[in-house]
Every structure is written in C-alpha cells, then in structure tokens.
Amino acid sequence: MEILVAIKKALKKAGIPEKYAAKVKALFNVESEENLENYVSLFKDNILPDLEASEQNNQNVINNAIAEYEKKHGLKDGKPIEGKGKKGKKNKTVVDDDDDDVDDDLDDLPPAFKKMLQAQQKQIQTLTDNISTLTKTVSDSGKNASAKALFDTAKLPEKWFKRIDVNSETSVEDQIKELQEEYKEIRQSAISDEVDAGNYRPYVAQPKDRTEKEWLEIMNKDEGTGDSNGVASLGID
C-alpha cells in the first residue's frame, strides 16, 4: 500500500489522475520509489493519451448503446416512459448502468451498434497488447543497464554479457558470481596446461636500477669491508 501512495503522489505531481496508480504499478512492476518519476513520465507520454482516448471512445459507444436500448424499449434513465408501453406487455427496465449489464443486452442492440462495440473491443485489446510490449521493453532496458554496470565491475570477457538473463529467477549478482567462478576455472586450467607442457614462466620482478654508490655499499656490506677497515675509498659520495 505504501508504494501505491508514493505512485499517487508522483501522478498528482505530474498532473495525472491518481486513479491510474494501480495501473502504473502493474505496467512497470513498481516495487520501490526508485525510477518512479521516469515510469510516470513514460506513462504520461506514451500510454496515457491512448488510454484516455480509448476510455472516452468506449464511454461514447456505451452511452449510444444505452440510448438506443432505452429508445427501443420506451425507457428514460432506466425507467418506463408513461404511455409508451405496449398493451398487454410490460416495458423492460434497466437494472443499472453497469457495463456488464450493457454487455448482457448486446443481442437487443441494432447490428450497427453491435458491430461498433465489437470493433471497439478489438481496439482496446490491441492497445492493451501495445502497452504490454512497451512496458516490457522499458523494463528490460532498465534491467539491462543495471546488469551491465555490475558486469563491467566484474572484469569478465565482454561477450559473456550475452549470457546474463535479466528476467531469470536467478539474480544478476548470482549469475555474475557463477561466471566469475567459471572464468577463474578456465584461467587456472590454462595455466596448468602450460605448466604441464613446460611453457609456463612465472613472472620474476626485475631488479631496480641502482647508482654506483648503492652498488658499492652493497658490495662492502656483503664482503664485510668499508672505510673503517682500511679499504680505500673510491671517492664516490
């Protein structure tokens, strides 16, 4: 519930009705406030316009269907119009204006309105599919960016990034750890093969360059000699 409150605040700040909070949460799989403003911005720019247009068109079709139904059955606001009922036959009454009741009465609608409603339903389904595709694309893009940042710090071969599945049940961190273990084993195996073949040469640090004075001091120290025991000075300070 706390995340829904945060989403509502973000929607209100962006000038979007708060009623879309649950839809934003579901579309972008929002679990925390991280990147929330970006999700709201994407929703506002790419989804909301089509969603509002679809809702308006759908409402217009429903209103027209209800008006046609009431006209056919002599009703107004769901109530019989006096003097309009047929003799020996009671007028039907509308239970309520709920969308489900309108759908139940589609058989009583003129063919033109039935066709219009069916076309509208197809449009809504197409819009829903497009929203789902866009949401998945946005979600995967964000996941890939985060995964790439973690992958780069692991110092693994670049082409191995293709082996990371951001939608896997196994976390990206655990997948990277598995790749690091595999990479370590491959390197160790390569070194072992080189050793067995007699081609491995361990790294040996090169001695640093020394001055003549430093070499003289080392030689005197190794031989146990110096100025104090009668060895002539070379005149090197």
Image (spheres, helix red, strand yellow):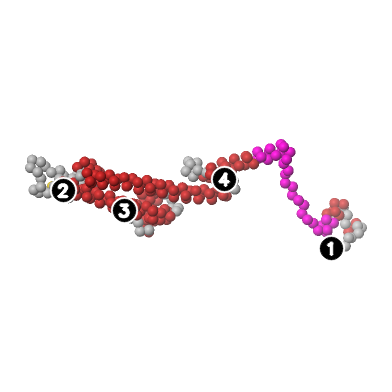
**Which quadrant is home to the C terminus?**
bottom right
Left of 5 or right of it: where is 56? Answer: left
Residue indicated by mark 3: 53
Q: Kindly indicate whether the residue at mark 2 contacts the one at mark 1 (C-beta within 8 angstroms).
A: no
> Is residue 52 something that shows in the picture?
yes
The magenta-colored residue range is 188-216
Q: Quadrant of residue 90?
A: top left
Task: Tell me, for residue 71, which label it has, or none.
Answer: 2
Q: Earlier in the sequence, mark 1 or mark 2?
A: 2
How would you rate the neighbour count of disc 4 (Cα within 10 Å): few for under 14, some for 14-19, many for 20 or more? few
Depicted 211 relative to depicted 99: above or below? below
In the foreground, 70 or 209? 70
Q: For the residues labelled 4 and 1, say whether their Cβ atoms are less than 8 Å apart.
A: no
For the residue marked with disc 4, what is the amino acid? Lys
Q: CA distance from mark 4 to mark 1?
A: 58 Å
- In primary-sequence order, the first of circles 4 and 1 is 4
Q: Secondary structure at mark 4?
A: helix
Judging from the image, what secondary structure is the residue with disc 3 in? Answer: helix
Q: x, y percentage for residue 56? A: 28, 53
The mark found on residue 154 in the picture is none
Q: Secondary structure at mark 1?
A: loop
At 21% across and 41% down in the image, what residue appears? 107
Q: CA distance from mark 3 to mark 1?
A: 92 Å
Q: Which residue is mark 1?
A: 237
Label located before the other in sequence (3 or 2):
3
Amino acid found under the numbered disc labelled 2: Lys
* Chain-order first, disc 3 or disc 4: 3
Q: Label 4, on which residue?
A: 159
How far is disc 3 from disc 4 in space, using C-alphas?
44 Å
Q: Does the magenta run of residues contain 119?
A: no
Q: Position of residue 2 (x, y in %)?
A: 39, 51
